[in-house]
Image (cartoon, rainbow, N blue to C red):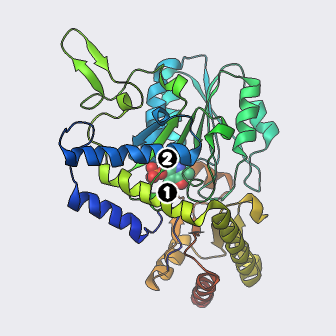
Amino acid sequence: MYLDSAATALKPQTVIDAEKKYLEQYSSNVGRGLYPLAETATEKFEAVREKIARFIGAADTQEIIFTSGTTASINLAAGLLAESVHPADNIVVTEMEHHSNYLPWKELAKKCGASFHVIPITGEGAIDIATLKNSIDERTKIAAFSAVSNVLGTINPVEKFVAAIKGINPQTLVLVDAAQAAPHMRIDVSLWRADFVAFSGHKMFGPTGVGVLYGKAALLETFPPIVFGGGMVFDACAEDTRYREIPYRFEAGTPNIGGVIALGAALDYIENIGFTNIRAYETALTAYAQKRLQETFDDAIRIIGPKDTKDRGGIIAFSLKNIHPHDIAQLLGEQNICVRAGEHCAAPLHRRFGLSATTRLSLSIYNSEEDIEKLITALKEIQKIFSVA
Ligand code: PLP
């Protein structure tokens, strides 16, 4: 029983078939070959770029850079911005960030001698808009926050936050980590108005090793490439090098072609179900899980994050009195119930709540109330074992 979709989602057959078909029937490189097989691969690869642009409301395919995942996307954005950050500047993130949207900015600030500011979160695991506004000033070069927390499940009002940041300092560049939003709700970059948006294919039913960095075209145009090699250059010689147009100049080397093509199948899978249905189903299931866990374990359970299900995605991190999360996850694992235990790559967040670790279940459209009941039965057994010990 799989309750770890925030780590990576299970893959539908259509996604597996798409990758297999590429490998079996038209495996070749993209953007280079002039023979039909390579043309087919290139067409299919570029068709996914178009599909992604439509999927997230981007104005142009030029704004879609393929990467290996959210981590690579955010590191790429931080690399592109390295020359623009100066010692008097500050970079702002939030206390709920995954390390992937925390460490690249912390390191960039350190490298540039800029200050690094972490916006505190509330006891319910939300970002207070007044606190957010107080953290932005005329020296804020970059603000980075997640659309959905991978621990608290908190859904941040992205559009409102971006508007608030830009309202104080229109020059601040905003990056949204949409890793936990992309599989569950519509990303619309035309509404969000963030400068960068990052997400991973594998969390949205696609394969591992593929992700996206969306960047506004006018902004991307201002950056030179930072990774060099094949596929990103028109002409290279000792005297002069002419780099290709965006997004290709940021995609040096052979990409994960089969992965990108299979991600296209994953987007079709999501579109066929529809985000309205996905969100309605997952919200109802999350509410059910919250209620059942709370009423079953009462004072012994501590669920962190928003109480109101409408403010959270299908992620529930909790601690059970006197039982270490690793013991819970291991004993559940013995019954083939897959949950995560630890800090979930969010140490600052756990520190904020005075916790060294939590157990996390994360839901997707293939989960059911029956899964929640099985989990609760297993947790009750574990509680019994520890109360005897
Ligand atoms: N950001 C968030 C909010 C995440 O949940 C994750 C992964 O769990 C990441 C970033 C990193 O994603 P990836 O490991 O696919 O690069």
Q: Mark 1 sits on what residue?
A: 267
Residue 229 point in image, percent of width and height: 25, 29
User: Relative to residue 171, is residue 93 depicted above or below?
Assistant: below
Residue 255 point in image, percent of width and height: 30, 43
Going 59% across and 47% down the picture, which residue do you hit? 97
User: Relative to residue 322, is residue 43 depicted above or below?
Assistant: above
SS for dot 1: helix
User: Relative to residue 340, is residue 250 depicted above or below?
Assistant: above
The yes-or-no answer for disc 1 within 8 Å of ligand 1 is no
Is there CB contact under 8 Å for labels 2 and 1? yes
Q: Residue furthest top?
A: 239
- For the question of whether residue 314 can be seen, the reply is no
SS for dot 2: helix
Query: Type of residue at label 1?
Result: Leu
> Looking at this view, is 311 or 31 the one in front?
31
Q: CA distance from mark 2 to mark 1?
A: 8 Å
Query: Type of residue at label 2?
Result: Ile
Q: Is residue 242 left or right of residue 357?
A: left
User: Relative to residue 301, is residue 314 depicted above or below?
Assistant: above
- For the question of whether residue 212 can be seen, the reply is yes
Going 66% across and 19% down the picture, which residue do you hit? 139
